[in-house]
Image (cartoon, helix red, strand yellow):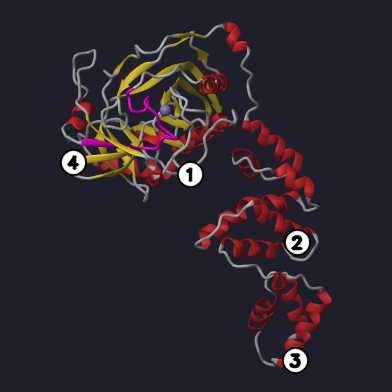
Amino acid sequence: MLDYKKLGFMCGLEVHYQLSTRKLFCHCPNLVHDSNSISYKIQRNLMAFEGESGKKDIAAEYEESKNKTFIYEGSNSSSCLVELDESPPFPIDQGALKTSIQVAMLLNMKIVNEVIVMRKIVIDGSNVSGYQRTTLIGRDGFLETSKGKVKIPTLYLEEDAAQKTSKTKDTVTYNLSRLGIPLLEIATSPDLQDPEHAKETAYLIGMVVKSTGKAHRGIGSIRQDVNISIKNHSRIELKGFQDLRSIPKVIDYEILRQLKEKNESSHVRKVEPNLTTSYLRPMPGSSRLYPETDLKTIQISKEFLKTIEIPELLTERALNFEKKYNLPSDHAREIVSENIPFDYYAEKYKIEPKIIANLLIEAPKEISSRFIIKKQLKQKDFEFVFDNLENKKISREAAFEVLKDISLDIKPNLLKYQTISLGELEAFIKDLVEKNKGVSISGLMGDVMKRYRGSVDGKSAMELLKKYVR
Ligand SMILES: [Zn+2]
């Protein structure tokens, strides 16, 4: 176990959340298309240019030195001339603006008096124009965590970049459908005390964003960057966390790596699937913001702010679920964060809510960790299982087996799982023991389970075996 205090551990987060509203500066929908629905392709080259400070951005120079041609693939239903930088931006999307203000309010931030859109130079080609539009919405906020307040200095509303789909020695290809999707960028101060604290804070920020009901779901809709430094070492930014749960491990590995390095300069690293990190690029410089002259400043009046309602926090909604149904808190939190219609199931079926929650939340996870699944479980699959469970046609154990069968695209054979009476089980065991004199209890247990897996509980079977085997 590392002693984070002794190491002088400093850690802050920058989380990015896509919103499910329309795009930020045009009317295109938030639809991510794959390469099958491409309707056009364009090609561009980018050059680094001097920022206001007169100094070329080092990250920009780094990218320029790569001398790439950028290819953009788009679909007419998810991108327009704005993404291609051939038409000026439309005024900022009101839905996204409202959601960003709600999040800023939930994070106890001061809301800006005016929304001023800025251009941030981005030279890796992920924005056709060579810059990303961004606007400060809130500042000086905080979040309560189990280890005290974490300061949230800034919340920006910005446009997401195009998604890199392939690259060769001279070209990089981007899919345009993601470009322009509203993105919240929420940064914490380096207040995080240890890796678990970083994970908790990332989780809590996620809950705040999801509380608005406008967090976009799906792969790539959330991105967390972690900035860390330890005494006598440069600051390192870690990008590309696939899963919030991996944060503590990745940070630990990174600290161990840094302890072996000397005289390393600040840079950005990418998180690999095995949770180690690899060099990505130099740290971006600071000379890269200038005003977006195509957009008017929007005044945020006190009257306007009064019209924005503050949504109920999901953490509070989770607590209500926990109390109402006597559920474990992690299940209650998952119900709200995954938007599972739990009330519906709990009211429809006379089944203990804990069992319902377990089948809805744990069963799919266990199945996918143990088997290669072919089908995602749907509401009708759960209802099929709950119906049979409620009518005592199958046992709780069998409910899991049936869900597993459905996930593996096997038609579940309910006859196999039908519950049997204790009398029936006893008759079977008595007969089995008589026919298999000398076979051990564990050997016979194997036979019982082969015949009745999912229909009997192991404990009763074992008691009966002990009764008859002498
Ligand atoms: Zn568009």
Image quarter where the C terminus lies is bottom right
- Write down the residue under mark 1: 245
Q: Residue visible at 67% across and 54% down?
A: 380
Residue denoted by label 4:
170
Q: Nearer the viewer, residue 261 or 178?
A: 178
Majority secondary structure of magenta residues: loop
- Mark whose residue sits in front, 4 or 2: 4
- Residue 294 found in image quarter: top left
- Residue 82 lies in the magenta-colored region: yes
Q: Whole-Å distance between the Cαs marked 3 and 1? A: 53 Å
Of mark 2 and mark 1, the one earlier in the sequence is 1
Measured in 3D between alpha carbons, the distance from the residue under mark 1 to the one under mark 4, in whole angstroms, is 36 Å
Marks 2 and 3: in contact by CB < 8 Å?
A: no
Q: Secondary structure at mark 1?
A: helix
* Residue range of the region highlighted in magenta in the rendering: 69-86
In the displayed structure, 31 sits above or below 294; it is below
